[in-house]
């Protein structure tokens, strides 16, 4: 099992698919990383068949050119915290755990709001 960017990649997957297990790397970035390896890594190679040199090459490419895992998570949470601290509309929505991007909240948004809590009875 190859360890790239602090993540153990699944050994039976192709390298272009296995790179997607790293937070911040999707299909496109995975293909770009392999392309930047200058032909030293074939996209159809299985992770178990990677050499140490190839794994080190992937590590150096990811460290130099991409924000992944902890660094990316810190940046995103820092951005959200900045919105909250400045008191912007988006920050207030984050603070209240409501949808941030203008979605309706009267009927939908159960994912953000959580389980329904009945406020009062509707009997007269």
Image: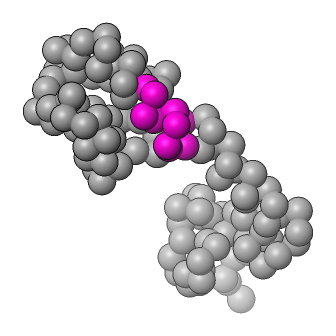
Q: Residue furthest front?
A: 38
Q: Height in image: 82 above or below 42?
A: below
Judged from this view, the residue extending furthest toward the left is 44
Q: Answer whether residue 13 is visible to the viewer in this image.
A: no
Q: Is residue 50 magenta?
A: no
Give residue 123's quadrant in the image. Answer: bottom right
* Left or right of residue 1: residue 93: right
Q: Quadrant of the N terminus?
A: top left
Q: Main secondary structure of the magenta part?
A: helix
**Residue drawn at 58 percent across, 58 percent down:** 115
Query: Closest to the observer: 18 or 29?
Result: 29
Image location (x, y in percent) of residue 38: 25, 37
Q: x%, y% of residue 43?
A: 16, 36
Structure colour scheme: one colour
Return the residue nearer the eye: 46 or 115: 46
In front here: 33 or 124? 33
Quadrant position of the C terminus in the picture: bottom right
Q: Is residue 47 above or below residue 91?
A: above
Q: Residue at x 16, y 14 (%)?
A: 49
Residue that sits furthest to the right in the current view? 86
**5 shown above or below 113:** above
Q: Quadrant of residue 10?
A: top left
User: Residue at image x 62%, y 43%?
Assistant: 73
Residue 40 left/right relative to 62: left
The span shown in magenta is 59-69
Residue 73, compared with residue 2, is above or below; it is: below
Q: Is residue 24 visible?
A: yes
Q: Residue at x 40, y 44 (%)?
A: 25
Instruction: Please state if 116 lies on the left or on the right of 24 as rendered.
Output: right
Find residue 68 and report its horizontal and vertical position in percent. 52, 39
């Amino acid at each position: 099992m190859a360890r790239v960017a602090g993540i153990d990649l699944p050994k039976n997957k192709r390298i272009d698919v296995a790179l997607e297990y790293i937070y911040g790397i999707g299909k496109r970035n995975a293909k770009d990383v392999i392309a930047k390896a200058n032909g030293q890594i074939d996209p159809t190679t299985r992770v178990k068949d990677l050499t140490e040199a190839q794994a080190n090459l992937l590590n150096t490419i990811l460290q130099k050119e991409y924000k992944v895992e902890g660094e990316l998570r810190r940046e995103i949470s820092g951005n959200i915290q900045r919105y909250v601290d400045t008191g912007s509309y988006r920050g207030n929505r984050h603070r209240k755990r409501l949808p941030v991007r203008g979605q309706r909240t009267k009927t939908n948004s159960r994912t953000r709001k959580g389980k329904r809590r009945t406020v009062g009875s509707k009997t007269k």
